[in-house]
C-alpha cells in the first residue's frame, strides 16, 4: 500500500478545525433534520457557530458557560432519538464535565460527538487552559472513542465515521491554523486503525495530533542523516491499533511516541502498555508535555521546543534511542 | 374516576409497593430505603394514573418520560415495573445487586429499557430531561417530561445550570419533582447546605413552583390534576413540584432516621417493618 501524500516542510498550508468543523456540522444538519448542535457560549454573529445558530435556531442549544449541562443536554437529546454534536473548550469539557461524559454519554451509550477545542498546549493560555489529560481520561472510559486528528481535514473524516456509530466519540481539536499534514483525503481512514505515513526501518515515530506533523518533519531530519524512520499516525487513542504498533515494534525495534498531551495516560502510555504485554523487544521513549509538573506558560511552538517534541527534539530522541 | 376512589386506589397501591420494596431489600441486598419510601406515593400516582404510559408498550413514541435523577430510588421503580408486569418480582429478588444481574442499586437503561436513562451520579437528570424536552417540543410532541430529584441532590450545581437553561428556553413540557424529604445522606438538608427558601429559589430562576405534601395522596392528585395542559410548542415557565415528604415514610422506625438512607434488613427488622406497614392498612 502506498503512503498518503503529505505536504513538505516548505508548505504554508494550514487548517482551522474550529472553523471547518462548524461548517461540516451545518452541512450535516442541512441533510439530516435529526441532527442537533449544542454549544457553550460560542455563537458570535460573525463566526461559524453563530451562522449555524442563525440558520437552525430550533436545532441549536446554547447552554452558556456550562459544560456539565451541555453534556447532559446532549444526552437528553440523544435519548429522544437525535444525533448530537456538542463543542466546547477542551480543558473544561474534559475535566469539568468528565462525570457527564462518563455517565450520561458512555454509560448510557448515546451517539453524541463531543468536540473539544484547544487540545494540548495550543491555547497558549496556561495550565487552566491547556488540555493535557483528555486522551488519558477518555481512553479510560468504557465505550468511548477518542480521536486525535493529525490535522483539521482529518478531523472531518472522524466526523463521517461518527455518523455511522451508535456510541459517543470525543474529537480533540487544536486551536486553529495548524499546519496540514495530508495533501488530500486519498488515504484509508478508519477508527481504531493507525496510518503508516512514511515507511522506514531503523526507528519509528508513533504520534497523534500535532505530533504527526512534528514527527513528519523529524523523519526528514533523520533521513538527511541517513536514518530510515517510519511514521505512524495513531489518531485513535481508543480503540487503539495494537496490531500496527506491534508490527512497527517488530520492524523497527525502536519507537518514539509524540503527543501534545501529558505523558501519563495518553498515547505513549497506551503504547507502552501494549508493548510491555506483547513481549516484543523494543527500545521506547515517550515525548509530550510533562505530567509531573504543570506545564510552563508560552505559545505552543515555543513549548514544543522547550519540552523536546518539536521536529529537532523528536529527531534527537530517536537518535538517542538508536545509541541504546 | 371520582377523586375519592382514585385516591383510595392509589393509596392501596402505594402501600403494596412499599411492602414490595421492603421485601426486595430483605430478599436480596441492602437498598436505599429512605428515599424510596418517601417518593413512593408520587411515583405510584404517576405510573398508575398520571403518566401517559402503557406498560405493554413502554417504549411507545408518545409516552411521557420520567427521568429518575435520584437513581438510588431505582429499587422503588423496579418494584413498580414488576407490579405492572414488565418482569416478575422473582426477577428482581434474584437480580438485585447480583453479579451479571440487571437490577443495580442504580438503574441501567441498557439492562432495563423501561428506564429512560441510566442514572446514579446525582445532578445529571435535569440536564438530560431538559435535552429530551427540547427534542420532543421540536418534534411537535405533546409528551411530558418529568424529572425526579432528591432535595440533597440540589446541592449539585449542575441542577442550577439546567434550571437556567430550561427557563431560558421556556419549556412548558418539563416538570421537575423534588422529593423534599429534608434529609440527605447523613444529616438534614437545612443543616448540611440550607435549601430554603426553595420556592423562592425556583421563582428567582424563572420557574413556576407548587408545594404540596408528597405523602398525602389527595394532595398529590390535586397537584397532578392541575398540571398545565399539554400544548405542543407552548412556551411557558417550566414547573417545579416540591413534594414535601418524610424519609422512610410508612415504616415507623425508618421515618426521619438517616441510618435507613441505605440499609439491609434481617428477619427481625423485616418483620417489624412489615408490621408497621400493616398497621397503616388496619388503620384505614
Image (tube, helix red, strand yellow):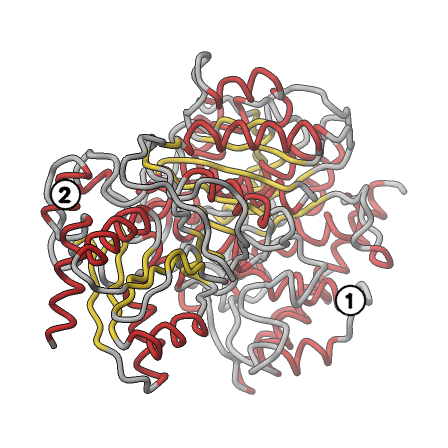
Residue A138: x and y in percent read: 40, 57
Which mark identifies residue B65? none
The residue indicated by pointer 1 is B83
- Front tag of 1 and 2: 2
Which residue: 40% across, 45% down?
A6
**Residue at left offset 61%, top offset 46%:** B214
Mark 2 belongs to chain: A
Say whether residue B80 is visible: yes
Q: Whole-percent x and y of residue A26? A: 59, 27
Location of residue B132 with respect to A190 vertically, above or below: above
Q: Where residue B142 sits in the image (x, y, percent)?
A: 78, 32
Seen as rendered, the residue at the extreme right is B1
Kindly state the secondary structure of the residue where label 1 is placed: helix
Q: Residue furthest top?
A: A45
Position of residue A179 in the picture relative to residue B100 (left or right)? left
Vertical placement of B241 versus B25: above or below? Answer: above
Q: How many marks?
A: 2
The quadrant in which residue A293 appears is: bottom left
Badge 1: residue crowd in 10 Å (few <14, some 14–19, many ≥20) = some
- Identify the image quadrant of the N terminus of chain B: top right
Q: Which residue is drawn at 45% across and 56% down?
A: A3
Cα distance between the residues tagged 1 and 2 = 63 Å
Q: Do labels 1 and 2 share a chain?
A: no
Q: Mark 1 lies on which chain?
A: B
Q: Which dot marks residue A303?
A: 2
Residue at disc 2, secondary structure: helix
Q: Give above or below for B209 relative to B42.
A: above
Quadrant the C terminus of chain B occupies: bottom right
Q: Nearer the viewer, residue B200 or A63?
A: A63
Question: Do we see residue A138 in this rendering?
Answer: no
Image location (x, y in percent) of residue A291: 17, 58
Position of B222 with respect to B182 (left or right) is right
Amino acid at each position: 500500500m502506498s503512503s498518503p501524500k503529505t505536504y513538505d516542510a516548505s508548505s504554508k498550508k494550514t487548517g482551522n478545525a474550529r472553523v471547518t468543523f462548524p461548517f461540516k456540522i451545518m452541512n450535516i444538519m442541512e441533510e439530516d433534520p435529526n441532527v442537533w448542535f449544542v454549544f457553550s457560549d460560542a455563537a458570535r454573529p460573525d463566526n461559524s457557530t453563530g451562522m449555524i445558530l442563525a440558520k437552525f435556531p430550533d436545532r441549536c442549544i446554547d447552554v452558556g458557560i456550562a459544560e456539565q449541562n451541555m453534556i447532559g443536554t446532549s444526552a437528553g437529546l440523544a435519548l429522544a432519538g437525535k444525533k448530537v454534536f456538542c463543542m466546547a473548550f477542551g480543558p473544561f469539557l474534559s475535566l469539568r464535565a468528565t462525570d457527564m461524559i462518563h455517565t450520561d454519554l458512555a454509560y448510557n451509550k448515546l451517539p453524541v460527538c463531543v468536540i473539544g477545542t484547544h487540545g494540548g498546549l495550543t491555547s497558549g493560555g496556561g495550565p487552566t487552559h491547556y488540555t493535557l489529560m483528555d486522551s488519558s481520561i477518555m481512553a479510560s472510559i468504557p465505550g468511548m472513542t477518542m480521536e486525535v486528528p493529525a490535522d483539521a481535514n482529518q478531523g472531518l473524516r472522524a466526523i463521517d465515521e461518527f455518523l455511522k456509530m451508535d456510541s459517543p466519540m470525543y474529537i480533540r481539536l487544536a486551536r486553529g491554523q495548524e499546519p496540514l499534514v495530508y495533501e488530500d483525503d486519498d488515504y484509508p481512514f478508519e477508527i481504531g486503525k493507525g496510518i503508516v505515513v512514511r515507511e522506514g526501518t531503523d526507528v519509528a515515530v508513533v504520534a497523534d495530533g500535532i505530533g504527526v506533523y512534528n514527527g513528519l518533519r523529524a523523519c526528514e531530519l533523520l533521513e538527511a542523516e541517513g536514518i530510515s524512520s517510519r511514521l505512524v499516525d495513531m489518531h485513535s487513542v481508543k480503540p487503539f491499533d495494537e496490531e500496527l504498533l506491534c508490527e512497527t515494534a517488530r520492524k523497527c525495534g525502536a519507537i518514539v511516541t509524540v503527543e501534545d498531551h501529558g505523558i501519563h495516560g495518553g498515547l505513549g502510555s497506551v503504547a507502552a502498555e501494549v508493548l510491555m504485554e506483547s513481549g516484543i523487544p523494543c527500545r521506547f521513549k515517550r515525548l509530550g508535555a510533562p505530567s509531573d509538573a504543570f506545564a510552563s506558560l508560552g505559545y505552543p511552538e515555543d513549548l514544543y521546543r522547550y519540552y523536546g517534541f518539536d521536529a529537532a527534539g523528536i529527531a534527537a530522541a530517536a537518535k538517542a534511542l538508536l545509541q541504546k | 374516576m371520582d377523586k375519592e376512589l382514585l385516591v383510595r386506589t392509589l393509596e392501596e397501591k402505594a402501600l403494596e409497593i412499599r411492602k414490595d420494596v421492603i421485601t426486595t431489600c430483605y430478599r436480596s441486598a441492602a437498598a436505599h430505603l429512605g428515599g424510596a419510601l418517601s417518593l413512593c406515593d408520587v411515583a405510584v400516582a404517576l405510573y398508575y394514573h398520571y403518566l401517559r404510559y402503557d406498560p405493554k408498550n413502554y417504549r411507545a413514541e408518545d409516552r411521557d418520560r420520567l427521568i429518575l435523577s435520584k437513581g438510588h430510588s431505582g429499587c422503588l421503580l423496579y418494584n413498580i415495573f414488576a407490579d405492572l408486569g414488565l418482569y416478575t418480582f422473582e426477577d428482581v429478588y434474584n437480580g438485585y445487586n447480583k453479579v451479571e444481574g440487571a437490577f443495580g442499586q442504580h438503574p441501567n437503561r441498557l439492562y432495563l429499557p423501561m428506564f429512560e436513562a441510566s442514572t446514579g451520579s446525582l445532578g445529571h437528570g435535569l440536564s438530560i430531561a431538559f435535552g429530551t424536552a427540547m427534542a420532543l417540543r421540536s418534534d411537535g410532541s405533546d409528551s411530558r417530561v418529568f424529572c425526579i430529584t432528591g432535595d440533597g441532590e440540589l446541592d449539585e450545581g449542575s441542577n442550577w445550570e439546567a434550571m437556567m437553561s430550561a427557563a431560558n428556553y421556556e419549556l412548558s413540557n418539563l416538570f421537575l419533582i423534588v422529593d423534599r424529604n429534608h434529609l440527605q445522606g447523613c444529616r438534614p438538608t437545612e443543616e448540611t447546605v440550607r435549601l430554603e427558601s426553595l420556592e423562592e429559589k425556583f421563582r428567582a430562576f424563572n420557574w413556576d413552583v407548587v408545594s404540596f405534601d408528597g405523602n398525602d395522596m389527595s394532595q398529590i392528585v390535586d397537584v397532578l390534576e392541575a398540571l398545565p395542559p399539554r400544548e405542543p410548542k407552548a412556551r411557558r415557565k417550566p414547573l417545579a413540584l416540591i413534594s414535601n415528604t418524610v424519609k422512610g415514610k410508612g415504616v415507623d422506625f425508618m421515618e426521619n432516621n438517616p441510618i435507613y438512607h441505605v440499609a439491609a434488613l434481617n428477619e427481625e427488622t423485616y418483620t417489624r417493618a412489615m408490621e408497621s406497614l400493616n398497621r397503616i392498612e388496619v388503620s384505614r
